[in-house]
Image (cartoon, rainbow, N blue to C red):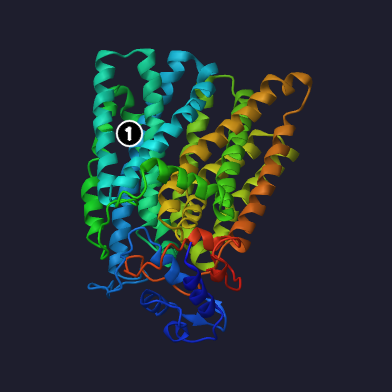
Amino acid sequence: MLPPERLSALSEVNSSPAGNGRKACSKNSTPMDQAFFSRINFKDGNFFDLQSVLITMHPYATTAAAPDPDPDPDPVGTGNHANQKSILLFFYFFCVIAVFWTLKPLRTSSVVKAFGPDYYPLVKQGLVLLIPFVLVGYSVLVCRLDRLRLVFSITAGFVGMNIVMWTLFQTHPGNLLKMAFFYYIDTYITIMAVLFWTYLNDTFNTEEAKRHYGFIGAGGLVGGIFGSLISGWAGNMLGDNIILASTAFLLPIFPIVASLERYRSSPVIKGICPQGTRTASEVFLEGVGTVFHSRYLLGIVAIVGLYEIVSMIVDYQFTAALAESFASRHEMAAFQGKVFLTAQLLSLAVQVFITPWILRRFGVTTGLLFLPIVLITGSAAFLLVPALATITFAISAETSMSYSINQTSKEILYLPLDAVSKYTGKAFIDMFVLRAAKTIGAGILLTYTLFLKHHGVPASALTFVGIAALAVWIYVVLETTTHSTQIFKGPIPSPETPLPKPGNLSVVGAFSPMKAPALMPVREKAFSA
């Protein structure tokens, strides 16, 4: 928390009339405050522009007040620098997702053949027990390594693990190894996806995100299609060797990230606790505590959790409708393949053509509302006409939009967060909360299939549960993006611009009325276009 005299200086500036921040500084302000306030603009009277506060809290912002020796000639991402970064990040995401979709069929089939389809849902939930250990390990790396070494170390670790897994499948291909491989692939996509989006959010600002996240996200969709084609066409021929072959997608990540680092003007700082003032476990616990003490982050928790629950319900309803409609499992698999391939292609089209336009024209709130509104429409249609066609529409909408406009819009919510929230709070949400929500969804389904179904409760009960969750989801989106956050008025400057650090100011605290009250401005539309 800021010292009382610093809060007093901030209070006087926050209540000053329109004008330059430097002139508004009071006698209580320090030289660092003078430099800090000089970067804050006052517009339309008492509206406080938080853009400088947010950029100051950038995880790798410099602590010196000296001017940027190499100012970014493309501060809002409209020129060549942002375009070149977007292309590199497109291929970065492509590589991450291509590995997963290349190995996912082998991961699933290995477990199903080893333990049977009835035990498959239980095996899937076992990852929840591993996530706390994964989170602690990830926190250790985040605490100790700078962003470049963090990406290099984790990527190199998975390259090595792919080779180890391939070797073990050649020598000890038992059921225990197959289960370990299942959890390894889930751990891979959990960590690599969190790492990619965190690195991306540390590369662009909000205005750049609205322009470029649609294109960058398309890289993952193309990677998914490409990986699926490899596993489908070459899986039988390669066998377990596909594990080794998939490693080729990880190798380009090293030169891609090295090239991205050349576009940064801010110095590389070693981790988020470089001076030994906090241990990795303290950073991890601080990240978890940050989530539960911030209404803003709790809103993101609810958005992530409700999506996973609704997704599991829709997926179960789709699978049940398929089982009733097709007698042969081969016919069922063929229909599923057509549906999901169509959904992936539709997702790519949405990401490339619709997502950027929606974000620029209507803002992030509309982007976040797209999926729940379409799903509530599909669920209502399935409730009125419980047929394969209506639930196919719902599952296609869920698949095509969850990895396109919904994912992109959700990631933009993390942009204004401070270092702990961005690197450990986000990891907690995307790793633990996501898996915990899947467990809750599985519990709902098991309760229905094992108990309620045998007592005459109709399948429509699950639809009502899904619609109720979707209604709460819509409310949370509106509450989080409109009432629980602060506004950035005008374009936000590049996160690479070095600024002084004003004490212990926390952006997350600014989102809550119980923290940093001097930084609470008149509320405006958050995340508007």
- Between 507 and 441, the one lying in front of the other is 507
Please state if 262 lies on the left or on the right of 143 as rendered: left
Residue at label 1? 230
- Between 287 and 463, the one lying in front of the other is 287
Where, by quadrant of the figure, is residue 307 drawn?
A: top right
Secondary structure of the residue carrying tag 1 is helix
Q: Which residue appears at 70% of the width and 43% of the height?
A: 467
Q: Amino acid at mark 1?
A: Ile
| Residue 256 at least partly seen | yes
Q: Which residue appears at 64% of the width and 58% of the height?
A: 479
Where, by quadrant of the figure, is residue 448 drawn?
A: top right
| Residue 339 at least partly seen | no
Give percent across and percent down for residue 478: 63, 58
Q: Residue furthest right?
A: 456
Q: Which residue appears at 56% of the width and 83% of the height?
A: 44
Please state if 1 lies on the left or on the right of 303 as rendered: left
Give percent across and percent down for residue 251: 22, 41
Q: Which residue appears at 53% of the width and 23% of the height?
A: 121
